Amino acid sequence: MPAFPEAARTALADEQLRANLRKATTTIRAKREAVVAERADWEELRAAGAAIKDRTLRHLDRYLLRFEERATEAGAVVHWARDAAEANGIVVDLVRAAGADEVIKVKSMVTQEIELNAALASAGIAAYETDLAELIVQLGDDLPSHILVPAIHRNRTQIRDIFRREMPDVPDDLTDEPAVLAAAARRHLRRKFLTARVAVSGANFAVAESGALVVVESEGNGRMCLTLPEVLISVVGIEKLVPTWADLEVMLQLLPRSSTGERMNPYTSTWRGVHPGDGPQEVHVVLLDNGRTDALADDVGRQALRCIRCSACLNVCPVYERTGGHAYGSPYPGPIGAILTPQLRGMRDDPVAASLPYASTLCGACYEACPVRIDIPAALVHLRARAVDATRGPLSPERAVMRAAAWTLAGPRRLGAAQRLAALAGALLGRRGRIGPLPGPLSAWTRTRDTRVPPAQSFRTWWRWNRRGTAE
């Protein structure tokens, strides 16, 4: 993928994409605003959610070990994965050990992050997405462009065309009515639900005190995956922990209102280990780091690990609404992706990740919408500084200019000399009161910005002349 500026330029030229995004995000925003307004204690809930996540992150090592102990007691097998390659290897080995060559999947951002489907395909294992939007993306050989609604960039006519082209069992006269499309997807997936031996899921939350995992969804496909197969493999980012069921109660009030604009999710599934004769008889949990401990070490950037993947920040972001998710080059698009992706992937050798902290107007709408009070604008500014350090080194032109400015502003004589030089330069370079494009190193700044000509007389000179009677 190209860096964000180039990818965004391409997206902005797609009028259909912009229309689809505008309609979808406007609808979701309105639903969210209505249900949030019902809660007089919404700000208190936000503060509680942020406090729970911060407490968990401060003591993450302790809660992870507690979760492992409780999950193991219940019959689950807990695996630890340092990175994507390790996590993919664990899942592939487990699927092979089960004697399966296909898996069904619950919608999962973390499996998109580690590119699990591609790893399974390389091992000769077919992965079938069962979430309707993820199925649309998969059948269209596409990538998700939204955390909650992966196919938000498609309208229903485009979805109908994908189904006609890719589903072997749909009629030629398939219409684009939502109910008809949903029924076609149900028929397409039914055999997979009933015959698959292995399912793969993520988790919205993991409860440390009990070793339980939680998935919230709207369609019921997740519950089919979590109960019917013989083997269940759940890949979970280590930041998904909450300490207690009481903490989960707060999160389950924040998440549905912020994501789908509902008071509660239609399906909330919890599972813990193995229960003889009921559900999967082999349960595995893969706890994934993949850059999260690096983010945890950053006092400002660690806020991103509070995220509960509600997508509220995407739906209010003016940049996302115009470019869509693909421009971010990451499974995590929008404002949260702009601060999470650079920390998970690093910026030194990844130009896409290094460009993301600049994919924002810093308007602050994302912070106002975030249910766990992630100060995304502050994190963006912080990561911009890190991006300069990572990609341009200690001797970058920007750093040199800032150091020169600091040296100049630190001494009154140096500042006075700089003001006189600026006035002279303005007289030589200015045209009609403005300085236009300049050559050489200054062109990157001046080709898109005009600068006012500095005044011929500085305030210091004026003050000395008018208040002290002597010219400088």
Image (cartoon, helix red, strand yellow):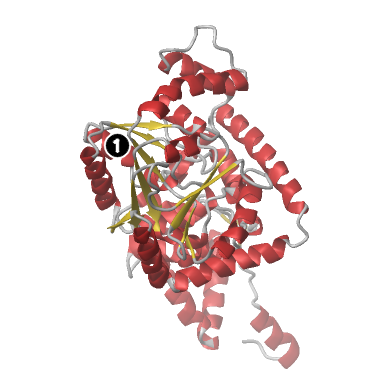
Q: Is residue 137 visible?
A: yes
Amino acid type for the residue under numbered disc 1: Ala
Pick the quarter of the image with the C terminus: bottom right
Give the camera-side residue of 36 and 455.
36
User: Where residue 295 sits: x, y (%)?
Assistant: 40, 65
> Can you see residue 443?
no
Q: Residue 365 in the image: x percent, y percent?
A: 65, 55
> Whole-percent x and y of residue 306?
51, 62
- Residue 436 is situated, as x and y percent measured from the top left of the image, at 55, 53
- Horizontal side of 442 relative to 218 (left or right) equals left
Q: Secondary structure at mark 1?
A: helix
Q: Which residue is mark 1?
A: 118
**Foreground pick, 59 / 426:** 59
Pick the residue in front: 281 or 302.
281
List the single residue furthest toward the top: 172
Q: Residue at x 42, y 47 (%)?
A: 202
